[in-house]
């Protein structure tokens, strides 16, 4: 167990009782009682997870109900997203990790060779019929590491981001939704110079940001047929296949062409000049105050953070955001967005856990429809009437205060989300679904290296290469570095470790996939 002075993690005290939930069958929603488990025994488990925008509340009635149904006592602490990895690295270095870890996508690969995690295959077969049934087979296969199943995959919807535009500004200026880069450029000029808010002042910009600047240019890159992901390395060495070659996006001709287009917008002064320097909360407020006409970000930014949480319509009456759909077409007719892949997280269990079967049983319950609905929507009759009806006033308040559903981030049921989304009568959810549906309908550009373990070369040079990519992107766009120096950028990128990292990733890809693709640089 963890030392008292170690980083605090949330603890479960689990009392397995025969009569929990609505029967003893796992398919009916209760936790299966294995013949080797002792009834009325108490098991303590610990878990660590990022907060993902949620707040843990000890007296959450939905949590109390979950405890009542399963015999589980929960005492939870969550770490902020931006601090999670550093905290977890400390725990991993000490070898003293919690029983259950929720890690981002394929982050478990960074620790698996240290012997930190349990191979779950046997436990899943014995204790997790619902997890095995409800998680697609290809995800189990995708998350195997050296032939072992160290994590339970958290299923992800690959299309997450949406380019959005001020529909009320389009209507005011008698403009149509843009379909290509030329039309987009014309609209950005109109949004900047034609007083779309009607206040008689030159105080708006066409293109802005409402989260991080690296996201807002994704549809432009997509119009050139590439998906670099987040500029600066959140998607390490994103690459694509061209014939028999693998090509790194960051030094590709398409990347250069996209930067040239973005620079043109910058030179025309239709991009918010503070775009590269603002913090996320500042950018959100600028968007909520009606100062920008376009941004690209997570699907929830416009309908939830701007309209619901920041109450943009009270600040700017009549403001209306709409997804740009289909995505902007480029000079060759290409369009699309970056694919975030089908793995949203990996749930690992410590190799030192004294009660791995108890952890797996609890996770399996969260995979049932009963357990999943409770974790996501709260108590039926108190927080919601049905999964397709509007939340109650109490439920909406709990959701807005972000404490209702933190445990919904442990086990995913994409199939239920899609079924309920299609049938929902909740106007708030219907508005959310406009943006969710748009994100799922774009052509998605996948990183060829998705799911491939990070190489030693990446661990050595990756951060420096990513930092250089980000610096040079800003330099090229703002004109501090002329695009005529592209060749120098490519050579420096190679020397800083880009070539070494890329070659190692191509070799690892060929090894795992049984291919003979060539490093195309």
Image (cartoon, rainbow, N blue to C red):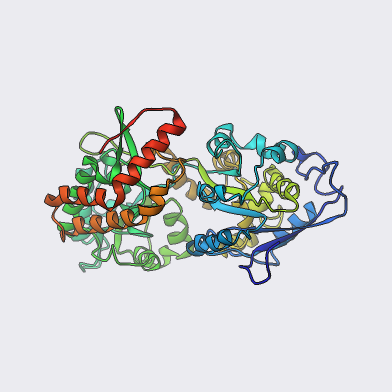
Instruction: List the single residue furthest toward the left.
Output: 484
Q: Residue 226's image quarter?
A: top left
Quarter of the image with the N terminus is bottom right
- The correct choice, above or below, for 395 with respect to 150 in the image is below
Residue 196 percent location from the top left of the image: 25, 59
- Residue 295 visible within the image: no
Quarter of the image with the C terminus is top left
The residue that appears at 58% across and 34% down in the rendered structure is 136
Residue 17 percent location from the top left of the image: 85, 51
- The correct choice, above or below, for 400 with respect to 171 in the image is below
- Between residues 91 and 13, which one lies in front from this camera angle? 91
- Residue 237 visible within the image: yes
The residue that appears at 48% across and 50% down in the rendered structure is 431
Residue 517 percent location from the top left of the image: 34, 30
The residue that appears at 78% across and 45% down in the rendered structure is 30
Q: Residue 123's image quarter?
A: top right
- Between residues 125 and 497, which one lies in front from this camera angle? 497
- Between residues 402 and 74, which one lies in front from this camera angle? 74
Residue 111 percent location from the top left of the image: 54, 51
- Number of dots carrying numbers: 0
- The correct choice, above or below, for 367 with respect to 479 in the image is above
């Amino acid at each position: 167990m963890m030392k008292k002075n170690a980083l605090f993690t949330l603890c479960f005290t689990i009392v397995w009782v025969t009569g929990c939930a609505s029967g003893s069958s796992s398919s009916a929603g209760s936790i299966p009682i294995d013949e080797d488990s002792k009834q009325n025994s108490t098991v303590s488990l610990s878990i660590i997870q990022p907060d993902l925008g949620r707040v843990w509340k000890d007296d959450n009635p939905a949590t109390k109900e979950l405890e009542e149904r399963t015999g589980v006592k929960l005492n939870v602490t969550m770490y902020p997203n931006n601090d999670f990895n550093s905290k977890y690295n400390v725990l991993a270095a000490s070898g003293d990790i919690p029983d259950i870890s929720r890690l981002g996508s394929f982050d478990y690969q960074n620790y698996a060779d240290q012997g930190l995690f349990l191979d779950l295959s046997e436990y899943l077969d014995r204790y997790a019929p619902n997890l095995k049934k409800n998680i697609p087979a290809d995800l189990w296969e995708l998350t195997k590491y050296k032939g072992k199943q160290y994590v339970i995959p958290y299923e992800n919807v690959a299309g997450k981001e949406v380019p959005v535009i001020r529909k009320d500004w389009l209507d005011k200026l008698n403009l149509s939704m843009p379909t290509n880069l030329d039309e987009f450029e014309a609209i950005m000029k109109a949004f900047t110079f034609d007083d779309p808010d009607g206040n008689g002042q030159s105080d708006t910009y066409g293109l802005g940001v409402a989260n991080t600047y690296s996201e807002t240019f994704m549809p432009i890159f997509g119009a050139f047929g590439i998906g670099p992901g987040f500029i600066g390395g959140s998607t390490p060495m994103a690459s694509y296949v061209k014939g028999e070659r693998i090509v790194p996006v960051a030094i590709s001709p398409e990347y250069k062409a996209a930067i040239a287009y973005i620079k043109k917008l910058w030179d025309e002064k239709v991009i918010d000049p503070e775009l590269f320097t603002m913090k996320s909360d500042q950018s959100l407020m600028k968007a909520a105050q009606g100062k920008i006409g376009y941004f690209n970000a997570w699907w929830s930014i416009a309908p939830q953070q701007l309209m619901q949480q920041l109450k943009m319509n009270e600040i700017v009456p009549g403001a209306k955001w709409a997804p740009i759909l289909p995505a902007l077409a480029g000079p060759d007719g290409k369009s699309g967005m970056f694919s975030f892949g089908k793995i949203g997280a990996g749930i690992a269990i410590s190799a030192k856990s004294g009660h791995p079967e108890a952890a797996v049983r609890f996770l399996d319950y969260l995979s049932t429809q009963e357990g999943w609905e409770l974790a996501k929507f709260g108590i039926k009759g108190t927080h919601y009437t049905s999964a397709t009806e509007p939340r109650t006033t109490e439920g909406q308040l709990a959701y807005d205060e972000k404490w209702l559903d933190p445990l919904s981030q442990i086990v995913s049921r994409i199939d239920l989300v899609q079924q309920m989304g299609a049938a929902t009568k909740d106007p708030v959810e219907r508005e959310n679904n406009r943006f969710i549906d748009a994100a799922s309908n774009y052509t998605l550009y996948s990183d060829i290296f998705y799911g491939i373990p990070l190489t030693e070369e990446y661990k050595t040079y990756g951060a420096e290469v990513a930092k250089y990519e980000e610096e040079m992107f800003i330099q090229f766009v703002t004109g501090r570095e002329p695009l005529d120096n592209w060749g120098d950028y490519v050579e420096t990128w190679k020397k800083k470790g880009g070539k070494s990292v890329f070659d190692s990733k191509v070799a690892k890809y060929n090894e795992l996939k049984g291919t003979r693709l060539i490093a195309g640089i």
